[in-house]
């Protein structure tokens, strides 16, 4: 990626995340960057291309971050961290971020592609996570990690869809999500692995 393309993304990404895609004009971005629209269109032929590039960059960063995380922590440490994050998330707002709202409403095709790529990233990460747990003796060796990861990802997206359609309240979504993950995780843990996790969570 060229320096100019990176600069455009660097300026555009936080603005779109803050105020939404529709509120950020190409003209405003060009003024801030000190470039002409002609120069902008050399790197991004349309605003759709800019949005797609932003999504790809975010997906790449997430992939890099989770791979780094898995490589540097045990499965029990990761699960304890997720428990803390889940508790903090329960206290946060359930409003849809502006960029996501605009993406779903005005860029439905890009949104579908983004979700497809995110699903793939999540499933690849979970397969890696589950295999790591098997190596550490936390998860049962006979578990099909491909099937288990698919069940986890599908559960997540099913709940997200119900919540987005206002078919479930935030409280119901949290309860069903926690219950589903508890059932799925207890089904793949070894007895020793579950004891190790419970001790770590208590600490």
Image (cartoon, rainbow, N blue to C red):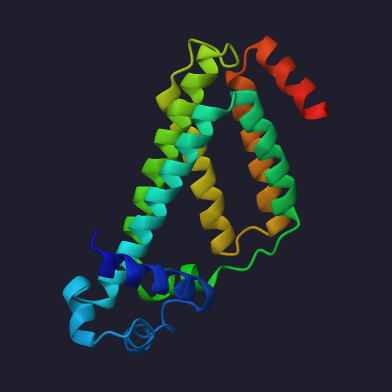
In the displayed structure image, the side of residue 80 where residue 96 appears, left or right: left
Quadrant including the N terminus: bottom left
What residue is drawn where x is 40% and y is 42%?
Answer: 121
In the displayed structure image, the side of residue 163 where residue 129 appears, left or right: left
Q: Considering depth in this image, is 156 or 133 the residue closer to the camera?
A: 133
Q: Is residue 123 above or below residue 136?
A: below
Q: Considering depth in this image, is 159 or 65 the residue closer to the camera?
A: 65
What residue is drawn where x is 33% and y is 72%?
Answer: 8
Q: Is residue 59 above or below residue 203?
A: below
Q: Is residue 194 above or below residue 122?
A: above
Q: Considering depth in this image, is 69 or 107 the residue closer to the camera?
A: 69
Residue 37 in the image: x percent, y percent?
23, 86
What residue is drawn where x is 39% and y is 51%?
Answer: 59
In the picture, residue 32 is in which quadrant? bottom left
What residue is drawn where x is 30% and y is 70%?
Answer: 50
The furthest residue to the right = 202
In the picture, residue 139 is in which quadrant? top right
């Amino acid at each position: 990626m060229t320096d100019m393309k990176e600069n455009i993304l660097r300026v555009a990404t936080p603005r779109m995340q803050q105020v939404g895609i529709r509120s950020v004009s190409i003209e405003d971005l060009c003024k801030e960057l000190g470039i002409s629209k002609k120069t902008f269109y050399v790197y991004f032929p349309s605003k759709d291309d800019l949005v797609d590039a932003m999504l790809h960059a975010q997906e790449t960063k997430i992939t890099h971050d989770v791979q780094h995380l898995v490589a540097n922590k045990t499965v029990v440490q990761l699960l304890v961290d997720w428990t803390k994050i889940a508790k903090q998330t329960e206290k946060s707002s359930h409003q849809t971020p502006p960029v996501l709202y605009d993406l779903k409403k005005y860029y439905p095709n890009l949104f579908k592609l983004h979700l497809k790529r995110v699903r793939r990233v999540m499933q690849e990460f979970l397969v890696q996570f589950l295999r790591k747990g098997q190596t550490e003796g936390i998860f049962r060796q006979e578990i099909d990690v491909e099937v288990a990861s698919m069940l986890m990802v599908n559960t997540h997206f099913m709940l997200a869809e119900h919540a987005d359609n206002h078919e479930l309240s935030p409280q119901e979504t949290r309860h069903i999500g926690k219950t589903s993950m508890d059932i799925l995780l207890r089904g793949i843990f070894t007895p020793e692995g579950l004891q190790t996790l419970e001790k770590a969570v208590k600490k």
